Amino acid sequence: MPRAARAVLVSAVAALVATACGPPHFGSAYRPRPSHSSAALYDPLGDSVAFIRMMIDHGKRKEVERRYWAKLVRGPDDAEARLLYALTLDDGPDATRLVDAALEQEPDLYWAHVVRGEMLARGKRWPDAAAEFERALAINGNVADAHLGLARVLRGTARVDEARAVYRDLAESHPENATVFAETGDLLRGLGEKGGAVEAYRRAVTLDPERYAALMALADLYLEAGDRDRALEFSERASEVNATSLAANLMRARLYKELKLVKEMVAAYEKALRGAPDAVAADAALRHEIGMARGPWYVARDDWGTAAEAYAAAAAASPDDVEAWKGLARARAATDDLTGALDAWARARALRPGDSGIVRAHEELLARVGAAPGTAHGGKTDAEVVASVRASVQKCWEKQLFYFPSLAGTLSVALSVDAAGKVTAASIDGDSMGSPEVAACARFQFLGATFPAGAPGEKKFDLTFGKAPKK
């Protein structure tokens, strides 16, 4: 490292570490690096550390966790095995204990000091992190990682000019280290120097084409600059590297949408769903966005079942979206889920009562199943209410007999009733008849019923029409 840059780093970090740890011994930590011969670069443990980090960057943490757990089981007293397994874990007590145990066993294990320093830095314990990186440098000043760690400490304590000098020096001494250029890009991007950041990130992904974070940073920067083609290029590369990346897949989907590439848009949204189902499930706006993108695509392909699933997700995520309910109603009707279609049209109609198209579609479906809108059933006893409902459902059944003369069977209906006797929910628990029209009619008629007031609860009834099949 050049004398001037080394002096800057030594002075800045020494002051920081002295605050909590007393004066460190920087003289031996910062010594000029030798030329990079193959022997100097060979570091089996460092290669394993790099491999684990690469796998995690690619969204494959569980795979390396299983692999290195097996190594730890085979060598529970192996300091390197402890360290490597700790790397596969999120920061926490288990990872800390493993690193501490590795250092207790081998106090001069360079990579254990680096990893402990990185963990402390992520917790913003800057003085402790700096001291740990310095210990690593006292063991081996030739590897870039501890220097990078100290540069992160400088960045974390707002010493950006010193950090910039360190990254500049590392770029000269380690020109093939992609991390140096990726972190230089992070620094410059944070300072608003977007042109320099793009140059640094591009150098990083040239050295390491699978550097996910740098690929996504480039995609973001190009998108901010309005260069959609390059934003799409780098988000696609990021998605290839990390198939579970929600950010990359969403960026791709939205860019494809702007470009009106519908097939590619839907594929990207579905990759986001597969890759990060928990994150999508936790975001209602995102579930709505994905559902409304997928629904029309599957309608156009006559895949009404998948379209219904997409619109149902959108409607559940955004219950006030009339278009989601309309799409769901049409898809359910196309799959003969007439009960669900009636529900969806009713929701759309409630949200937009003056829409003649919605009213017409709803009433046409009501007529199709033989249920008159506005019908209400009541009585002094449960039996009277059920008899009233049965009379209306029988008309639906008789209408279907014209098409299916042997239609017969039993519908088992489950109801939720409030204290006033009003039916608040109705479902078909059993159907030996097999007619979607009659089942929808029965459910709809019960939803208009009022039983005698009493304690709220559940009610169940069977309606049999024709000669029920033998069980």
Image: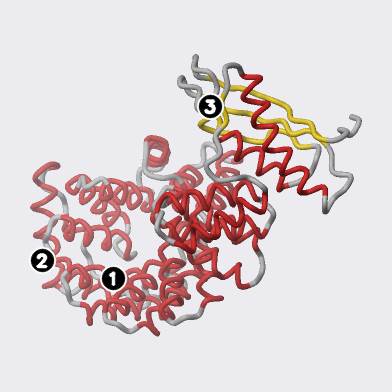
**Marking on residue 8:** 2
Identify residue for label 1. 33
Of residue 416 and residue 263, the one placed in the foreground of this image is 416
Q: CA distance from mark 2 to mark 1?
A: 17 Å
Neighbourhood count class around disc 1 (C-alpha, 10 Å): few under 14, some 14–19, many 20 upward:
some
Q: Residue at x 53, y 69 (%)?
A: 266
Residue 200 in the image: above or below residue 73: below
Of residue 259 and residue 184, the one placed in the foreground of this image is 259
Q: Earlier in the sequence, mark 2 or mark 3?
A: 2
Q: Residue at x 17, y 71 (%)?
A: 164
Residue 405 in the image: above or below residue 274: above
Q: Residue at x 84, y 43 (%)?
A: 407
**Marking on residue 447:** none
Does residue 274 appear in this view? no
Residue 48 in the image: above or below residue 33: above
For discs 2 and 1, the disc positioned in front in the rendered view? 2
Does residue 418 appear in this view? yes
